[in-house]
Image (cartoon, rainbow, N blue to C red):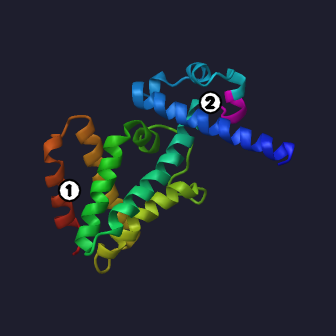
Amino acid sequence: MSVQERKQRERADRERLIVATARELAEEQGWDAVTTRRLAERIEYSQPVLYSHFRGKREIIGAVALEGASEMAVAMRAATAAAKTPRERVAALGRAYLDFADRNPAVYDALFQLDGGLAYAQEDTPEQLKGAFAALMETLGEVAGEGVAPGLFTEVFWASLHGIATLTRSRRLLPEDAEQRLELLVDRLAVL
């Protein structure tokens, strides 16, 4: 291995450590606790080292969001893979989405609540975000109904899932009714 390859590997390792540490700190204490000073202390590097990877917290949030989008896509695809019918796939997709939001609140916030400097629904949208939307559309596109654009249907269904996730987490909806909400959404919105 050349010196340059070793340095590139070390740089990539440091970047992964920064993102993992930011994510861990945000999940433990919330995003307000994530500062470059605290990250530098936790990973035992100087703040200038952090700034050599990320210009600030906003870019770190964006990196966490991209990692989370990839994980969410994998979780949704895994959940729908075993389902046999369109209805089972849509319900499994919804459960996987809501479960991901519940288990990873800081990552979910990085994806959909905080400014990570990422472009959504644009030409320059990062591939990880496009992949997460594609994971939704793979299942939802087949139940959009005649004459309904699959992408538009996916957006509406996704917005509904996001609303359920956000309102449940903020305790504006009772968590014990989550499954009933999902069943109602699947039965009333999807053409099965």
Q: Position of residue 72 (x, y in %)?
A: 42, 53
- For residue 174, side relative to residue 73 (left or right): left
Dot 2: element: loop
The Cα–Cα distance between marks 2 and 1, rounded to whole angstroms, is: 38 Å
Residue 100 drawn above or below residue 13? below
Residue 56 numbered mark, or none: 2
Give the vertical position of 56 relative to 13 (above or below): above
Residue 175, x across and y down, in percent: 18, 41
The stretch drawn in magenta includes residue 142: no
Labels 2 and 1 touching (C-beta < 8 A): no
Q: Secondary structure at mark 1?
A: helix
Q: Is residue 121 visible?
A: no
Q: Residue at x 51, y 52 (%)?
A: 120
Residue extending farthest to the front is 1
Which quarter shows the C terminus? bottom left
| Residue at (71, 27) in percent of width and height | 49
Residue 173 falls in image quadrant:
top left
Q: What is the span of residues highlighted in magenta in the rendered image?
A: 50-55
Task: Inspect this view and state whether residue 60 appears.
Answer: yes
Q: Is residue 52 magenta?
A: yes
Query: Which residue lies under the disc numbered 1?
Result: 182
Q: Which residue is painted at 66% across and 39% down in the image?
A: 13
